[in-house]
Image (cartoon, rainbow, N blue to C red):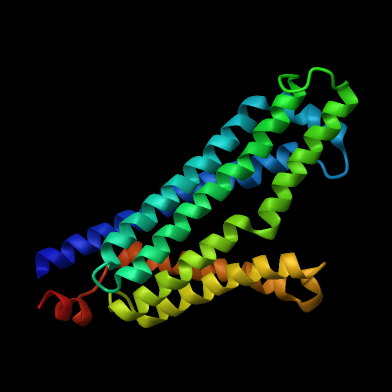
Amino acid sequence: MDTTLNSNSKTARLAASFFFFVGMPLSLWGQAYVLSKIFVRQDPVTTANNLLSNELIFRLSIFCHLADTIFFVLMILMFHRLFRPVDKHLSRLMLVSAIVQLSAVFMLEVFNFTALMVLKTETRVTFGIVQQQEVAYFLLRMHAYGAGIGMGKLFIGLCFIPFGMLVFRSGFAPRIIGVLLIIGGVGYVADFSTAVLLQRADYLMLRSFLKYTTLAYILSLLWFLVKGVRESESINRYNN
């Protein structure tokens, strides 16, 4: 039993480390720093010039976003292995949602890559410079709209809800950890829903609240990183 517990703790710590030591740094650099350095709202000309002047880091930001999402799927895959004895259906739902989220991110990054190709005249050579800049700006906005309405967030939320239910039922962690994950998942789904259904989600003061649901996810993974998992009576019943 001690061997199994140690193995499960190592799996949980390794999965959580993917987020803190790989996923989070890649996401902060690729999605926050690089895009803020390149994109200028309502200014296609400056945006296009920034993109061409920083082509390498823009390409790296695309790579980082994809790598970040791949490591997220790997993290969920490890948690799927950990929680499969608890409920195989919930663990499959968690994993499938993460894989679909990866597909959504790949689709979004096509807009970024195409914007660069338009400016480099590798797609439509008949476009003039002004047209290229406008189209590139439009594609970057398409990417921003996709991220804003939360195509990826929707599937992350649908992943976190069964994840939280598994944590709650398994006994691997305090039940409050499972509750926090469920809250985080519901927050992501609500963020997507309000962005689609409401012209401005801040009318109901929802967007400001929903941003903090991410903290539930971070705190939950931090617990797994530091504590691993504890012995679970429910798993003991499955094994016996």
Place of residue 58 in the rendered image (x, y in percent of width and height, measured from the top left): 64, 32
- Identify the residue at horizontal 84%, vertical 30% (top origin): 133
Query: In the image, is residue 121 above or below residue 104?
Result: above
Describe residue 27's horizontal placement relative to residue 142 as left or right: left
Viewer-proximal residue among 11 and 215:
11
Viewer-proximal residue among 177 and 117:
117
Q: Is residue 228 visible?
A: no
Viewer-proximal residue among 158 and 45:
158
Pick the quarter of the image with the N terminus: bottom left
Q: Is residue 42 visible?
A: yes
Place of residue 154 in the rendered image (x, y in percent of width and height, measured from the top left): 58, 63
Describe residue 226's horizontal placement relative to residue 118 as left or right: left
Place of residue 237 in the rendered image (x, y in percent of width and height, measured from the top left): 15, 81
Total numbered labels placed on residues in the image: 0
Q: Quadrant of residue 43?
A: top right
Describe residue 51's horizontal placement relative to residue 61 as left or right: right
Place of residue 126 in the rendered image (x, y in percent of width and height, measured from the top left): 84, 18
- Identify the residue at horizontal 68%, vertical 69% (top origin): 193
Describe residue 121's horizontal placement relative to residue 182 as left or right: right
- Identify the residue at horizontal 52%, vertical 61% (top origin): 156
Pick the quarter of the image with the C terminus: bottom left
- Identify the residue at horizontal 59%, vertical 60% (top origin): 153
